Amino acid sequence: MQPRVQRCWRNLGVLLGRAGALPVGDNPADEAKAALDTLLQNIVTSSAIEGEQLDAACVRSSLARRLGVDEANGSPSPRSEGLADLMLDATDRPESPLNVDRLFQWHRWLFPEADSSLVVLKPGEFLDWFEASRHDPTLDPLLRAGLAHFWFVTLHPFEDGNGRIARAIADRALAQADRQGIRLYAMSAAILERRTDYYHCQESSQRGAPDLTAWLSWFLDTLDATLLGALARIDRTLAKARFWQRFHDAGLLPEQIKVLNRLLDGGERGFEQGISASQYAKVAKVSKATATRHLASLLEKGCIMKLPGGGRSTRYRVATMGQAESP
């Protein structure tokens, strides 16, 4: 277990260091916008784990207003307002105690129209442990987050919403462990990707002997995957900033800039296998002939490089530092 704990702490430290190198820019809201994206992802994916598809634009609007970010899209709803309040209360105010009143409030934010009465009227032991364990030098804070998650979801005090509240409690424990880092990653997104294993590990640990090794190992591995994903996103952001510093005065056309940003952003929509002339034409909304000319110009300026292959299947990707290729 200790190697897993150490790996998570190491990657969290690297994440904080890389985040500190991000260009904040002249707009003080830049950092808030980055936090908004992470918090939004956490809220939307936590609900998706339970099979609920949220209106992301509404939730984004609610978060933006609370973070002081100017967002024109989306109209907040009572549901999105409650979800934003819950997430921020869980992670932005970790010093305040987790008590029965707070659990009731979280549940009301989750389900404004539902009865928030507790099915199990004795969550006090868990709540007492959660507060006391925060100051226990023998319990690693990351293990504490995993234990809190498992204990609450097993306690199952509400008719509904226990999983989402358990994940909020885990986020709160992680915020207490490192308040700065919690806005850089969304663990619920990684849990969603491993949803089947998530439920299987919970259920098998609940049925077995009081040994949570399997659950805690899964929790730490998932947290580590979350941190590595966040690191990859930050690396892309840093690479993008360096790229535009280099080609700021390259005289690029708006269509070329649009495609380059798409490539630099990566992910599912980033053409990880390279972009062809026909794909360029679709993204830039130009003819195939124009796309070919644009790509030739980008290649000549060193913005992109040609991948192995040729003919109609020729593909290109962004040229990183030292990889520019002349035609």
Image (cartoon, rainbow, N blue to C red):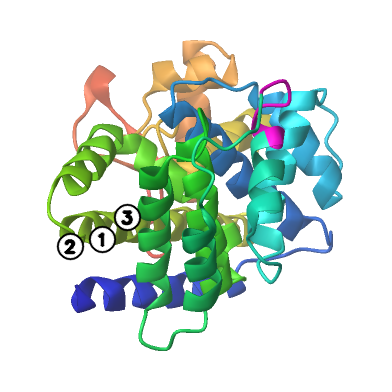
Instruction: Confirm whether residue 211 shows in the render.
Output: yes
Instruction: Place residue 75 in its image quadrant.
Output: top right
Instruction: Identify the residue under disc 3.
Output: 225
Contact, mark 3 vs mark 1 (Cβ under 8 Å): no
- Find out whether residue 306 is within the magenta segment: no
Contact, mark 2 vs mark 1 (Cβ under 8 Å): yes
Instruction: Confirm whether residue 251 shows in the render.
Output: no
Q: Quadrant of the N terminus?
A: bottom left
Query: In the rendering, which numbered label is found on residue 216?
Result: 1
- The answer to which of 160 and 185 lies nearer the viewer is 160
- Disc 2 is placed on an element classified as helix
> Separation of disc 3 and disc 1 at Cα?
14 Å
Q: Residue at x 69, y 32 (%)?
A: 254
Stretch of the chain drawn in magenta: 108-114
Give the x, y percent position of residue 320: 41, 57
Whether 293 is drawn above or below 263: the answer is above
Give the x, y percent position of residue 293: 50, 26
- Find out whether residue 113 is within the magenta segment: yes
Instruction: Place residue 240 in its image quadrant.
Output: bottom right
Q: Residue at x 70, y 34 (%)?
A: 108
10 Å crowding of disc 2: few (<14), some (14-19), many (20+): few
Residue sitting at the far front: 121
Look at label 2 and name its amino acid.
Thr
Whether 278 is drawn above or below 30: the answer is above
26 lies left or right of 111: right
Instruction: Identify the residue under disc 2.
Output: 213
> Separation of disc 2 and disc 3 at Cα?
18 Å
Look at label 3 and name its amino acid.
Ala
- The answer to which of 322 and 203 lies nearer the viewer is 203
